[in-house]
Image (tube, helix red, strand yellow):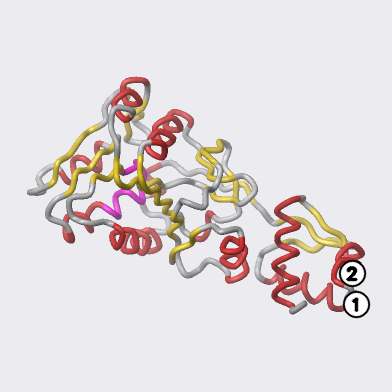
Amino acid sequence: MFANERRLKIMEMLEQKSSITVSELIKMFSVSIETVRRDLEYLENQQALKRVHGGAVSNQKMHSFANLENRMSENKALKQYLAKIAIQFIRNYDTIAIDSGSTAMELVPLLRDHFHHLTIITNSPEVFGSLSDTDGFELIQIGGQYLREEKAFYGHMALDAINRLHFSKTFVFPSAISLRNGIGVFVHELFDIQRAYIRNTDEVFILADSSKFESTASIKLCDLSTSFKIITDHELPDHMYSLYKKNDIQIIN
């Protein structure tokens, strides 16, 4: 077995359990202790795990949550990169749903610049307001209770409206992604809205910069699906990209 194959297997094991020992890796791969130590050292340098005495533990982290105002300036260049990839999957006359959040606002100007006819559904008044004077765009504002901190509508009225609609494409912007724990978010008020977007669409696009991979959030939105298209950036480590591809998760960067 080649070194990269062993390292992928080690990562898969850490997805199933939180720790592994040097002795079990020696037995599994039939290699020397020096070879196992080199593999673990390499993966630690890639921030894929943390070495401890006699083995290694998962390096999965709880992603921190910042308010919307701070998120608007956080990783702005990466979000712009994700938005540029996302528009490649949009066609004129599509009906698309757009989640609320800071990444959504990086997508908005590109929609204006590249398309002349779209139907856009959103629970974000910021997205709606930025596109409201765009000729050829049909806009559907999802209303309801207003969550001021996130500048988004939520609640039963919003959910009822979404459940009466169907979209060709949905764009969701989560806080965390993990093979083990799925897609994570922090704002419980918006949970049902995001779930409804995913449920009522033909295609799901998840936009998440590389810092959100193999981290967790306090609320599990859903499991990862092989049908989802995960859009990220080129800073995603090679071993993580390979691991997701090995699990048939579509990664686009």
Question: In the rendered view, does 89 fall on the left or right side of 2?
Answer: left
Asked which quadrant contains residue 89, the reply is bottom left
Point out the stretch of residues depicted in magenta.
98-107
Dot label at residue 32: 1
Q: Amino acid at mark 2?
A: Ile
Q: Secondary structure at mark 2?
A: helix
Whichever of labels 1 and 2 marks the residue nearer the N terminus, that label is 2
The image shows residue 57 at horizontal and vertical percentages of 78, 56
What amino acid does circle 1 point to? Ser
Extreme residue toward the left, this view:
135
- Give the SS element for disc 1: loop
Dividing the picture into quadrants, the one containing residue 127 is top left
Residue 201 part of the magenta-drawn span: no
In the picture provided, is 100 more to the left or to the right than 29? left
Image coordinates for residue 224, horizontal then vertical, percent: 54, 48
Please determine whether, in this image, residue 84 is positioned above or below residue 124. below
Q: Is residue 106 magenta?
A: yes
Q: Residue at x 49, y 46 (%)?
A: 175
Q: Which mark is residue 26?
A: 2
Q: Residue furthest top?
A: 156
- CB of mark 1 within 8 Å of CB of mark 2? yes
Frontmost residue, 72 versus 209 = 209
